[in-house]
Image (spheres, rainbow, N blue to C red):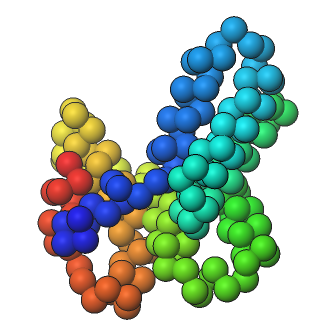
Amino acid sequence: FNITGLTHIVAISGYNISLVILLIFRIFMFLPQKPRICVASVFIMLFVFFVGFSAPVLRAAICGIIALIAMFFNREYMALRALLICAFLMILVSPDILVGSISFQLSFLATLGILLFSESLKNFFVFLPGKFAIRESVVMTFAAQILVLPIILANFGTLSLISPIANL
């Protein structure tokens, strides 16, 4: 996975948290929205408890709960703001996480890269087909790589040139 740039596939992340939220919303469809949001928040916390309190899991869970809070109060969810609040809270609780946790750095910077660069890169990769999410996969891979590349090179000394193809 390291050689091909696919370690994110086995990492628990925002995608997993999204699945938990969707599953809980479907199972508890009979409940009104606000109680469903509360149940989903509890299940996210249980999920984190069962899979472990790693930095990427906590980042994804906090961002997911912020999204649920926004939904609860009928407010717009702003992913970049949620990510910054999440980073602030995590660093406040554990200041050493900023420089001492490569997984925090990679998780935060990959998400930030996607939020900051994916829209611009869509225009750059317009020649790729949208079918089967080919364009989206390449865009997300490159967007995430922009900010994580320095961390990967500094800590692992590798650069996967086949990552964009492998991610398809």
Pinpoint residue 112: horizontal percent, then vertical percent. 53, 64
Q: Residue shown at 61%/62% (left/top)?
A: 53
Residue 2 visible in the shown view: yes
Whether residue 49 is situated above or below residue 132 in the rendered picture? below
Q: Position of residue 58 (x, y in %)?
A: 62, 59
Residue 77 visible in rendering? no
Q: Residue furthest front?
A: 50
**In the rendered view of the protein, which quadrant contains the N terminus?**
bottom left
Whole-percent x, y for residue 48 in the image: 61, 51
Q: Which residue: 55% across, 43% down? A: 17
* Lateral position of residue 156 relative to residue 161, left or right: right
Toward the viewer: 17 or 132? 17
Whether residue 163 sits left or right of residue 47 in the image: it is: left
* Relative side of 81 to 54, left or right: right
- As displayed, is residue 83 above or below residue 14? below
Residue depicted at 84% across the width and 33% down the height: 73
Where residue 93 appears, as percent x and y from the top left, is 78, 73
Position above or below: 23 against 18: above
Number of numbered discs overlaid on the protein picture: 0
Q: Residue placed farthest to the top in the image?
A: 30
Please give the name of the residue rendered at 77% of the width and 14% of the height, measured from the top-left corner: 32
